[in-house]
């Protein structure tokens, strides 16, 4: 018995092309906020706009670096992915220069207001020493991890005549090292740069 049901005609090449274009348009709309945030900060540089921090170009993916925390909870920087990382480096026992950096990181995070949960403070140790219990208590909430000194010097570029532990750094939520701040950092100017990053980014 022959059915009278109508068999749909196969889609024409033009219909298939239209469907593909619609799908690509939807994908573009979804990806646009992330692409726009990166373009606005890393590529498009309107006349008169200046950064206090130095952009690291090209960016360096540091996710695989073996950042080991004393409590064993961290195995690499990738464990902190999803957050903006404000990072300081300490080769010794965390004397005044180190505590000054910890103070700077704490104050910058506090000034981000409602965005503070997007920001993590990180202290990277390159030696065997650990900050005193008093320092750790005063800057509670700072993530402490250890990296080999040779990896730090190779991975964190310093300005001519300086060492990595004299700077503060920013790592984006994807694990890319993307900014370095000068020695004797100006907190007001650093705060403005961090605020710009958080405003421009839809990630982290």
Image (spheres, rainbow, N blue to C red):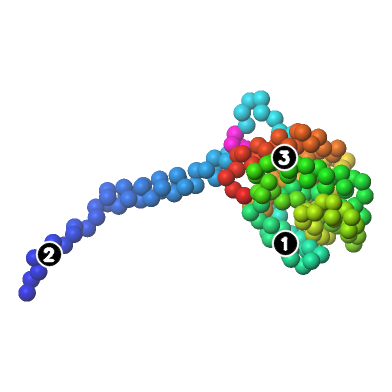
Residue 102 spot, x, y in % from top left: 83, 47
Crowd band around label 2 with a 10 angstrom C-alpha radius: few (<14), some (14–19), many (20+): few
Residue 70 versus residue 112: which sits nearer the camera? 112
Residue 117 spot, x, y in % from top left: 66, 49
The earlier-in-sequence mark between 2 and 3 is 2
| x 81%, y 49%: residue | 88
Image quarter (top left, top right, bottom left or bottom right) of the N terminus: bottom left
Closer to viewer: mark 2 or mark 3: 3
- Indicate whether residue 72 is drawn in magenta: no
The earlier-in-sequence mark between 2 and 1 is 2
| Cα distance between the residues tagged 2 and 3 | 69 Å
Q: In this view, does 76 lie to the left or right of 3?
A: right
- Identify the element where label 2 is drawn: loop
| Cα distance between the residues tagged 3 and 1 | 27 Å
Magenta-highlighted residues: 40-44
Marking on residue 5: 2
Residue 93 versus residue 5: which sits nearer the camera? 93
Instruction: Kindly give the residue lying farthest to the top in the view shown.
Output: 48
Q: Is residue 172 left or right of residue 166?
A: left
Residue at label 3?
Answer: 111
Quick check: marks 3 and 1 in contact, CB under 8 Å?
Answer: no
- Asked if residue 10 can be seen in this view, the reply is yes
Crowd band around label 3 with a 10 angstrom C-alpha radius: few (<14), some (14–19), many (20+): some
Instruction: Kindly give the residue lying farthest to the bottom in the view shown.
Output: 1
| x 93%, y 49%: residue | 95
- Identify the element where label 3 is drawn: helix
Marking on residue 76: 1
């Amino acid at each position: 018995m022959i059915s009278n049901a109508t068999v749909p005609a196969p889609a024409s090449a033009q219909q298939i092309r239209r469907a593909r274009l619609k799908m690509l348009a939807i994908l573009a709309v979804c990806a646009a906020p992330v692409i726009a945030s990166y373009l606005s900060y890393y590529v498009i540089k309107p006349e008169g706009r200046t950064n206090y921090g130095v952009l690291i170009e090209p960016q360096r993916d540091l996710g695989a670096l073996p950042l080991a925390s004393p409590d064993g909870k961290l195995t690499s920087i990738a464990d902190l992915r999803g957050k903006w990382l404000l990072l300081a480096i300490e080769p010794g026992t965390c004397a005044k220069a180190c505590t000054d950096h910890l103070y700077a990181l704490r104050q910058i995070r506090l000034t981000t207001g409602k965005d503070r949960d997007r920001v993590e403070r990180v202290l990277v140790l390159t030696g065997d020493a650990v900050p005193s219990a008093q320092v750790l208590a005063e800057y509670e909430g700072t993530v402490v991890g250890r990296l080999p000194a040779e990896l730090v010097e190779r991975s964190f570029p310093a300005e001519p005549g300086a060492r990595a532990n004299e700077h503060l750094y920013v790592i984006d939520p994807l694990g890319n090292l993307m900014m370095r701040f000068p020695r004797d950092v100006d907190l007001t100017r650093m705060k403005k740069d961090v605020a710009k990053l958080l405003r421009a980014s839809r990630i982290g």
